[in-house]
């Protein structure tokens, strides 16, 4: 028998240093939700913001009983913030959307219509990415296509964390307890019936991006190592190629010594060979180390996040 959930729609919004737009964020999210149903909740997850985001979240949530916030004891990261919000969500349909308003909340009703048509996952697919550098656009495009080639399942291209999922998708997602989260890949791996709606991503109006190149690179590597062992195979192939090259160099040196009665000069080539071999070894060890690090993180069995305060606790206490 299918379990009934008390809320029709949950919207999960991770927030990090967004004090300038909290009021507008709450207003636009509420308007989008009300255009669908009066039975909704909006969960803001404060990921250890260092500005006054938390204070402003407290104000807007105190004015509307459908608005709630969760605040972490420290910054745990964007993917973990989304996970915490989904863990707390009580809706039959769950939307995740970033709190910087680059993704328009006004798109949620259209996504919900697709959900009502029977789709379990509805992605918001970017047709344009305003305000982003050429470097970021190009590297993002390369990554999505590289990821699609490396994994054994179909993964959507040019989508972020703005999506709607059904309750049964979320229940399976909760069973994936990996510490290094890559939610986009996890949802695609589940394989539920999905579609997308197109939109043009807005330029960020206030502050700077919370995903600099270093974090983007970390997320990309998390995605690859979480769903593909191709980097390990690359390390193996590199090692094999180096062995073949070294063998051929050895054969040439012996042939030159015995057939031409000359030694092969090559102080420079010797140094180059040594440094090349060293580089391949370090690269291979680094790739193996990344996989071992993921194993260690998961076997520690620490909580994914630590909640300092949540208004959803008050809701539970009232029941």
Image (cartoon, rainbow, N blue to C red):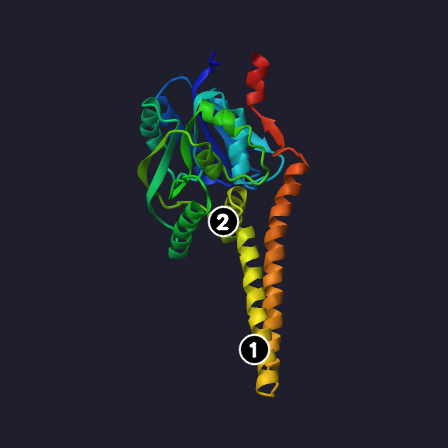
- At label 1, counting other C-alpha atoms closer than 10 Å, the crowd grade (few under 14, some 14-19, many 20 or more) is few
Q: Position of residue 255 (x, y in %)?
A: 58, 80
Say if 176 sits above or below 289 in the image: above
Q: Position of residue 146 (x, y in %)?
A: 43, 50
Query: Can residue 134 be seen in the rendering of this structure?
Result: yes
Say if 242 sits above or below 307 in the image: below
Q: State the residue at coordinates (45%, 40%).
A: 20
Locate residue 254: give its quadrant. Answer: bottom right
- At label 2, counting other C-alpha atoms closer than 10 Å, the crowd grade (few under 14, some 14-19, many 20 or more) is some
Q: Which mark is residue 252?
A: 1
Q: Position of residue 278 (x, y in %)?
A: 62, 66
Residue sitting nearer the eye, 113 or 85: 113
Locate residue 159: give its quadrant. Answer: top left
> In the rendered structure, are the residues bearing label 1 and label 2 in contact, judged by CB atoms less than 8 Å apart?
no
- Image side of residue 266 versus residue 141, left or right: right
**Element at label 1:** helix
| Residue furthest right as drawn | 300
Residue sitting nearer the eye, 263 or 303: 263
Q: Which mark is residue 216?
A: 2
The CA distance from mark 1 to mark 2 is 45 Å
Position of the C terminus, as image quadrant, is top right
Q: Position of residue 150 (x, y in %)?
A: 46, 47
The label nearer to you, 1 versus 2, is: 1
- Image side of residue 151 versus residue 127, left or right: right
**Element at label 2:** helix
């Amino acid at each position: 028998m299918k379990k009934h959930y008390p809320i029709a729609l949950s919207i999960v919004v991770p927030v990090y240093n967004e004090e300038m737009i909290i009021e507008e964020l709450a207003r636009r999210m509420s308007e989008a939700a009300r255009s669908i149903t009066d039975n909704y909740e909006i969960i803001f997850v404060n990921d250890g913001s260092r500005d006054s985001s938390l204070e402003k979240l407290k104000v807007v949530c105190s004015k509307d009983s459908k608005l709630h916030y969760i605040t972490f004891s420290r910054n745990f990261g964007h993917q973990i913030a989304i996970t915490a919000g989904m863990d707390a969500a009580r809706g039959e349909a769950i939307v995740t959307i970033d709190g910087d308003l680059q993704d328009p909340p006004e798109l949620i009703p259209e996504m919900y219509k697709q959900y009502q048509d029977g789709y379990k996952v509805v992605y918001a697919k970017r047709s344009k990415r305003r305000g982003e550098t050429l470097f970021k656009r190009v590297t993002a495009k390369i990554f999505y296509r590289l990821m699609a080639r490396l994994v054994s399942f179909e993964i959507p291209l040019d989508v972020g964390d703005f999506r709607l999922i059904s309750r049964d998708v979320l229940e399976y997602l909760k069973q994936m307890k990996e510490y290094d989260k890559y939610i986009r890949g996890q949802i695609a791996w589940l394989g539920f019936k999905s579609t997308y709606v197109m939109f043009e991503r807005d330029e960020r109006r206030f502050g700077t991006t919370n995903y600099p190149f270093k974090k983007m690179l970390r997320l990309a590597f998390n995605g690859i190592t979480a769903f593909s062992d191709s980097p390990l195979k690359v390390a193996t192939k590199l090692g094999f190629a180096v062995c073949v090259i070294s063998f051929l160099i050895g054969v040439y040196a012996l042939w030159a010594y015995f057939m031409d009665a000359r030694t092969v000069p090559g102080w420079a080539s010797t140094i180059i060979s040594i440094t090349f071999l060293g580089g391949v070894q370090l690269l291979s060890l680094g790739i193996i180390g990344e996989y071992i690090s993921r194993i260690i993180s998961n076997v520690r069995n620490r909580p994914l996040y630590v909640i300092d305060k949540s208004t959803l606790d008050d809701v539970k206490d009232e029941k």
